[in-house]
Image (cartoon, helix red, strand yellow):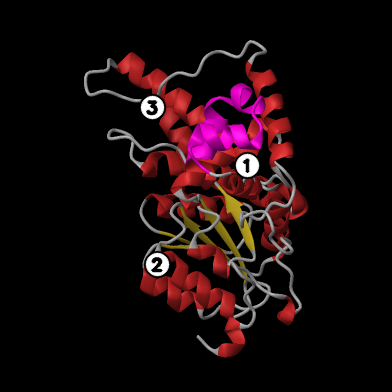
Amino acid sequence: MSENVKETFRTPGGRGGGDGRSDGRGDRSDGGDGRNTPPVPAALAAKVRTLAPSMTRSMQRVAEAVARDPAGCAALTVTGLAGLTGTSEATVVRTARLLGYPGYRDLRLALAGLAAQQQSGRAPTLTTDIAVDDPLSDVVAKLAHDEQQTLADTAAGLDTAQLGAAVTALAAARRTDVYGIGASGLVAQDLVQKLLRIGRIAHAHSDPHLAVTNAVQLRAGDVAIAITHSGFTGDVIEPLRVAFEHGATTVAVTGRPDGRVTQYADHVLTTSTSRESELRPAAMSSRTSQLLVVDCLFVGVAQRTYESAAPALSASYEALAHRHGAYRGRA
């Protein structure tokens, strides 16, 4: 990579001010997830699940403790929580800041608020571990609960300022390229077919060579979106980097706000990181949260471009109506 491109980076990622463009995140002093305001109490557990993979083991112990027992931890001083988790006071403070709070005092207030919410009559959490011998009725209940939790966590942690900026770029884009591999590739295709139905020029690329070839053609006024749950998928990061270097507005949809993909993203949309199990691989839970973000992007663009989107959507519906009607006629 050329030195002039390197100089546009802001550590840990994103464009600097040298090219006259802002990524809307400003200086990131909150641990690198792009949010400078503390999360509301309801979003705390989701925040822990999202950021836990990027924490040190000692910080994970602190985060897991506050998510597991907010009422108990809210009653503890910083020294008390450090003792409970076998860590240091400095680790507790660093964890609070990584979670988005200025200090431990602010985290304690959030914990107290979360504890009050949990004591207001909410039903106990259902375990989502699926056993090989579970009856299908239990499988349905557990998957439905886990999907609901994934959606709730994603909604609670989604930065609406970043979402709005991405929608603005998409609504004005000459062309949109979306990159995704595997399950994320299916989500990329879902977004593209939605955009096509409202008259937007969009392409989904799951072949890494074709993705890079197309990314070279992008320029200012175009948008490139990378979808990667891990944040480290090379075949997705490479075309986003190329698009970034050619001046396109870039968006990362990822479960890891510390992932390498965010280095080349003007806007980062964070999805929920759900717990993986033997019978529920990460691809299932990540797809659920990614589809929510994709739907938010699509609806936002449709709102911004309603005058042209509504007729285009109607036209696409009418063009396919005879096919759906043919099936109904055979019923």
Going 53% across and 47% down the picture, which residue do you hit? 51
Figure label count: 3
| Three-letter code for the amino acid on which mark 2 is drawn | Gly
- Gap between marks 2 and 3 measured at Cα: 47 Å
Residue 119 drawn above or below residue 101: above
The reply, left or right, for residue 36 in relation to residue 71 is right
Residue bounds of the magenta highlight? 61-87
Is 170 covered by the magenta stretch?
no
**Where is residue 308, by image quadrant?**
bottom right
> Residue 330, which numbered label?
3
Dot 1, how many residues are within 10 Å of its Cα: few (below 14), some (14-19), or many (20+)? many
Answer whether labels 2 and 3 touch (C-beta < 8 Å): no
Going 41% across and 32% down the picture, which residue do you hit? 327
User: Which comes sooner in the sequence, label 1 or label 3?
Assistant: 1
Dot 2, how many residues are within 10 Å of its Cα: few (below 14), some (14-19), or many (20+)? some
Who is closer to the viewer here, 207 or 282?
Answer: 282
Quick check: can you spot residue 198?
Answer: yes
| Horizontal and vertical percent position of residue 102 | 73, 47
Q: Secondary structure at mark 2?
A: helix
Mark 2, residue position:
234
Q: Residue furthest top?
A: 121
| Horizontal and vertical percent position of residue 279 | 28, 33
**Where is residue 80, by image quadrant?**
top right
- Gap between marks 1 and 2 measured at Cα: 25 Å
User: Which comes sooner in the sequence, label 1 or label 2?
Assistant: 1
Dividing the image into 4 quarters, which one contains the C terminus? top left
The reply, left or right, for residue 225 in relation to residue 310 is left
Is 84 covered by the magenta stretch?
yes
- Gap between marks 1 and 3 measured at Cα: 46 Å
**Where is residue 172, by image quadrant?**
bottom right
